[in-house]
Amino acid sequence: MTSLPASSLVETVANKIKQMILSGSLVNILPGERELGHRLSVGRETIRKALALLERDAWIAPPTHQGSEAHPENYGRRNG
């Protein structure tokens, strides 16, 4: 089995999280990095990088003390 380059894995995870937001399986406050990593079978560093991409593209709001907030209404505003 060939593993994906780190950047491709991060993009794949970010896309999976987008799909989870759009499907309604992730709403409002996202689970923590550990829980997301468990759900997607990746490490916390990969989750952090994927969340950074999603924050950059306005899919999620910056984390607060409660966690990152999903913004599915921003779908299609930016490329990706």
Image (spheres, rainbow, N blue to C red):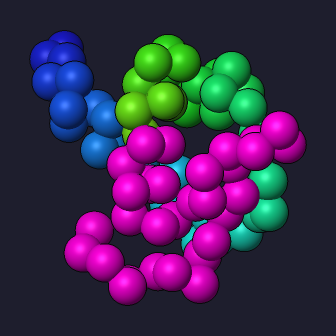
Q: Is residue 39 visible?
A: no
Quarter holding the N terminus?
A: top left
Q: Residue at x 59, y 84 (%)?
A: 73
Nearer-the-camera pick, 41 or 57: 57
- Image-based side of 49 in relation to 6, left or right: right
Q: Is residue 70 visible?
A: yes
Q: Nearer the viewer, residue 40 or 66?
A: 66
Residue at the extreme right of the image, as rendered:
66
Residue 71 vs residue 22, the one in the foreground: 71
Residue at 51% from the left image edge and 65% from the top image edge: 59
Left-right relation of 60 to 13:
right
73 vs 58: above or below: below
**On-image quarter of the C terminus:** bottom left
Residue positioned 31% across, 78% down in the render = 78
Quarter residue 24 falls in: bottom right
Residue range of the region highlighted in magenta in the rendering: 51-80
Q: Is residue 41 magenta?
A: no
Q: Is residue 3 above or below residue 10?
A: above
Horizontal side of residue 78 vs 55, given as left or right: left
Q: Position of residue 32 (x, y in %)?
A: 73, 32
